[in-house]
Image (cartoon, helix red, strand yellow):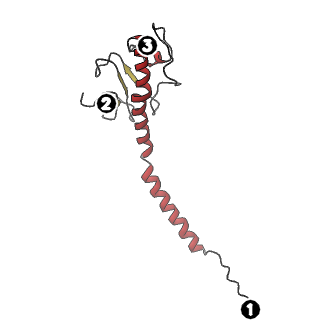
Amino acid sequence: MRRTNRMRGFTLIELMLVVIILGVLGTIAVVRFAGRAEEAKIETAKGEIAGAYGTALQLYEIDCGKYPSTEEGLTALKQSSQKGWKGPYIRTKNFNDPWGNPYQFRSPGTNNTDDYDLYSFGPDGQEGGGDDITNWAESQ
């Protein structure tokens, strides 16, 4: 019996076609998901303002009878000589937003006059401009 060798490799054209297809798919994926990192930072800032910082400030207010002053700032959540203080109320190395800029804190607030304003300047790092992330409704 005669035996034929049917083993055959890929041709150069087939390999190049696979590389091109993978390149196109990679480009599509990068373009499609490139904006997701910024969206994730925005959602993180919203979550920190409403969640971690909001909860820590509420606990501070319950224990001390008031929110920290603007001068005391968010650092009062980690260390304070305020009567009734039972903190630290938050574990963080700094009080920066996802873009590396400090969160802004005002107490009493100018937008939330009954308690405090807490906000981030957002992606552009500048106050105003419509991308600020705040703890008050935008219509105010």
Q: Looking at this rendering, what residue extends furthest in the left direction?
A: 139
Disc assigned to residue 2: 1
Q: Secondary structure at mark 2?
A: loop
Q: Amino acid at mark 3?
A: Asp
| Residue depicted at 43% across the width and 16% down the height | 60
Q: Amino acid at mark 1?
A: Arg
Q: Are marks 2 and 1 in contact (CB under 8 Å)?
A: no
15 with respect to 76 (left or right) = right
Q: Nearer the viewer, mark 2 or mark 1?
A: 1
Q: Secondary structure at mark 1?
A: loop
Quote the CA–CA distance across marks 1 and 3.
92 Å
Q: Earlier in the sequence, mark 1 or mark 3?
A: 1
Q: Is residue 23 above or below residue 34?
A: below
Q: Is residue 102 visible?
A: no
The residue where tag 3 is placed is: 63
| Residue depicted at 46% across the width and 9% down the height | 84
Q: Is residue 118 visible?
A: yes
| Residue depicted at 46% across the width and 27% down the height | 96
Q: Nearer the viewer, mark 1 or mark 3?
A: 3
Q: Earlier in the sequence, mark 2 or mark 1?
A: 1
> Callout 3: few (<14), some (14-19), or many (20+) C-alpha neighbours within 10 Å?
some
Query: In this view of the protein, which residue sits in the foreground, 61 or 5?
Result: 61
The residue where tag 2 is placed is: 128
Q: Is residue 114 above or below residue 18?
A: above
Query: In this view of the protein, which residue sits in the foreground, 90 or 41?
Result: 90
Q: Amino acid at mark 2?
A: Gly
